[in-house]
Image: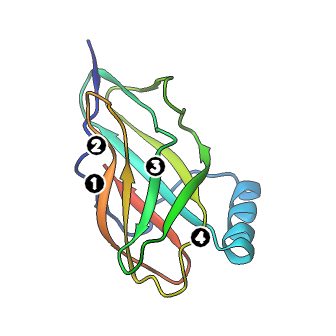
């Protein structure tokens, strides 16, 4: 049996152990500091014994709650774009990373919203408090 994860509910978590190569961490840190990018690391928990499928739509944005600004999704790691699907094995966690263009310096809270017609629902996390590093960890 294969199912699709419903991503309407997500929580911001404290810094977990994310398995990312040291080289990629260096590139991400440099990009965040130099180009003002926002990095979001996701952990998808699949406690079911059944495999599920995940993907991200390119129509995913960060919305500054204090202005009309939205940040574009500019790079993905360990997940595929729509229309493709990626397996999330049953009983295991999957991790992926999304990189967005920078938020305005005045932004203190933002929303993460994926706009899609996916039957399992879209990724959506609201009221994310901005931090100094612009690196965030979300668990679904």
Name the spot of residue 52 as percent of width and height, x first: 33, 25
Do the residues under discs 2 and 3 have CB atoms within 8 angstroms?
A: no
Q: Earlier in the sequence, mark 2 or mark 4?
A: 2
* Residue at image mark 2: 7
* Residue at image mark 4: 102
Do the residues under discs 4 and 1 have CB atoms within 8 angstroms?
A: no
Cα gap from disc 2 to disc 3, whole angstroms: 13 Å
Cα gap from disc 2 to disc 4, whole angstroms: 24 Å
Cα gap from disc 2 to disc 1, whole angstroms: 7 Å
- Say which residue appears at 75% left-offset and 75% top-offset: 34
Q: Nearer the viewer, residue 14 or 54?
A: 54
Q: Earlier in the sequence, mark 4 or mark 1?
A: 1
Q: For mark 2, does the 10 Å Cα neighbourhood hold few (<14), some (14 to 19), or many (20 or more) residues?
A: some
Q: Nearer the viewer, residue 22 or 88?
A: 88
Do the residues under discs 2 and 1 have CB atoms within 8 angstroms?
A: yes
Q: Quadrant of residue 1?
A: top left
* Residue at image mark 1: 10
Circle 4: element type: loop
Name the spot of residue 3 as percent of width and height, x first: 27, 21
Circle 2: element type: loop
User: Which mark is on residue 60?
Assistant: 3
* Above or below, comparing residue 56 to residue 137 in the picture: above
Q: For mark 3, does the 10 Å Cα neighbourhood hold few (<14), some (14 to 19), or many (20 or more) residues?
A: many
Q: Is residue 39 left or right of residue 126?
A: right
Q: Nearer the viewer, residue 117 or 126?
A: 117
Name the spot of residue 82 as percent of width and height, x first: 49, 29
């Amino acid at each position: 049996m294969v199912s699709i994860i419903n991503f309407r509910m997500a929580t911001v978590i404290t810094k977990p152990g994310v398995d990312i190569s040291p080289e990629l961490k260096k590139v991400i840190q440099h990009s965040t500091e130099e180009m003002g990018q926002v990095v979001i690391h996701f952990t998808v928990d699949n406690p079911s014994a059944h495999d599920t499928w995940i993907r991200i739509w390119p129509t995913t944005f960060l919305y500054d709650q204090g202005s009309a600004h939205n940040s574009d999704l500019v790079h993905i790691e360990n997940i595929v774009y729509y229309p493709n699907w990626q397996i999330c094995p049953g009983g295991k966690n999957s991790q992926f990373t999304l990189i967005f263009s920078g938020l305005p310096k005045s932004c203190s809270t933002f929303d993460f919203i994926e706009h899609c017609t996916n039957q399992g629902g879209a990724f959506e996390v609201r009221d994310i408090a901005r931090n100094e590093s612009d690196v965030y960890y979300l668990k679904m």
